[in-house]
Image (spheres, grey):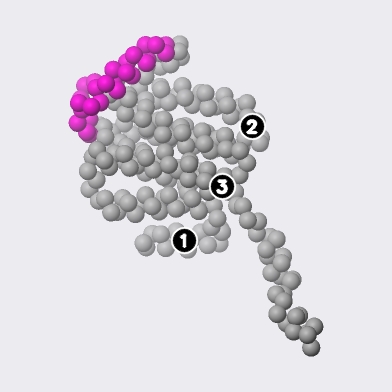
């Protein structure tokens, strides 16, 4: 009697045991991660573009491309090697300055002192400007673009050089610069639809934080639910 009772309350071993072994706990899906970073980064640069008139859309898209390239290099680091990823990181910094508006010749010849002097002038002019900025001081625009570039590359570096798997803490750290990219402009330029923009930001953040855990079979249902909300 006692033996039969023990057997009755034990969970079935066959299919459930196989199912638990077939689903590993830590899920790493680099393609989904790139999609999530790209979506949140795209929203961030669209918000950042509201601080300049006319909006430097193509330059900001180029900066976002650098972030995604670093994230992709991080996912391929076991194949490429740390040396290749490090070289890509250095080149991305130089490209960031060029995309932000620093003369290409200065970047190529590493005219650091001259570049730093003009950037300092642009930073000192920031407190007196109105946003969206449409003035004639090109270095104010360069400094604003550099701010976006630094935030995007910050995320790119975290994803490129993260050791081992990307846990929740590191994932949140990579998301913070992208959140700042979207939130800082709202403190300077009043958003037209603040509640809607808040919902969009939350949805994109949730995609970055937990999108890799959603099974492919359930992805369509999750996207449909998100669209309805």
What residue is disc 1 on? 222
Q: What whole-number distance in Å separates the C-alpha atoms at marks 3 and 2?
A: 22 Å
Q: Position of residue 190 (x, y in %)?
A: 22, 43
Give the crowd class for mark 3: few <14, some 14-19, many >=20 residues within 10 Å.
some
Q: Mark 2 vs mark 1: which is more N-terminal?
A: 2
Foreground: 19 or 58?
19
Q: Main secondary structure of the magenta part?
A: helix
Q: Residue at x 23, y 27 (%)?
A: 127
Spot occupied by residue 78 in the image (x, y as percentages of width and height): 66, 36
Residue with the mark numbered 2 = 80
Is 131 a magenta residue?
A: yes
Task: Single out the residue that lies furthest toward the bottom.
Answer: 1
Q: How far from the left and from the top, in percent, is residue 161?
A: 57, 34
Mark-to-mark CA distance, 3 and 1:
22 Å
Q: Mark 2: which secondary structure?
A: helix
Q: Earlier in the sequence, mark 3 or mark 2?
A: 2
Q: Quadrant of the C terminus?
A: bottom left
Q: Is residue 82 visible?
A: yes
**Horizontal and vertical percent position of residue 22:** 68, 60
Q: Which residues are magenta?
A: 111-137
> What residue sits 37% from the left and 40% below the top?
180
Magenta segment: does it hold 159? Answer: no
Element carrying mark 3: loop
Helix, strand or loop under label 1: helix
At horizontal 42% and vertical 11% (from top left) the residue drawn is: 111
Q: Which residue is mark 3?
A: 167
Task: Check if mark 3's residue and mark 1's residue have beta carbons within 8 Å.
Answer: no
């Amino acid at each position: 009697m006692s033996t039969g009772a023990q057997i009755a309350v034990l969970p079935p071993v066959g299919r459930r045991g196989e199912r638990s072994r077939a689903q590993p706990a830590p899920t790493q899906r680099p393609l989904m991660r790139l999609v999530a970073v790209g979506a949140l980064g795209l929203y961030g640069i669209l918000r950042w573009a509201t601080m300049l008139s006319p909006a430097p859309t193509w330059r900001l898209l180029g900066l976002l491309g650098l972030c995604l390239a670093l994230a992709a290099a991080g996912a391929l680091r076991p194949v490429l090697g740390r040396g290749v990823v490090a070289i890509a990181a250095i080149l991305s910094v130089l490209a960031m300055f060029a995309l932000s508006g620093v003369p290409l010749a200065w970047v190529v010849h590493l005219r650091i002192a001259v570049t730093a002097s003009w950037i300092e002038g642009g930073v000192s002019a920031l407190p007196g400007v109105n946003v969206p900025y449409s003035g004639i001081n090109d270095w104010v625009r360069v400094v604003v673009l550099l701010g976006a570039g630094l935030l995007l590359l910050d995320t790119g570096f975290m994803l490129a050089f993260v050791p081992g798997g990307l846990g929740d803490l590191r994932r949140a750290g990579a998301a913070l610069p992208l959140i700042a990219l979207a939130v800082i402009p709202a403190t300077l330029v009043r958003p037209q639809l603040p509640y809607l923009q808040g919902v969009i930001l939350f949805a994109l953040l949730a995609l970055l934080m937990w999108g890799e855990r959603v099974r492919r079979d359930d992805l369509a249902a999750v996207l449909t639910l998100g669209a309805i909300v």
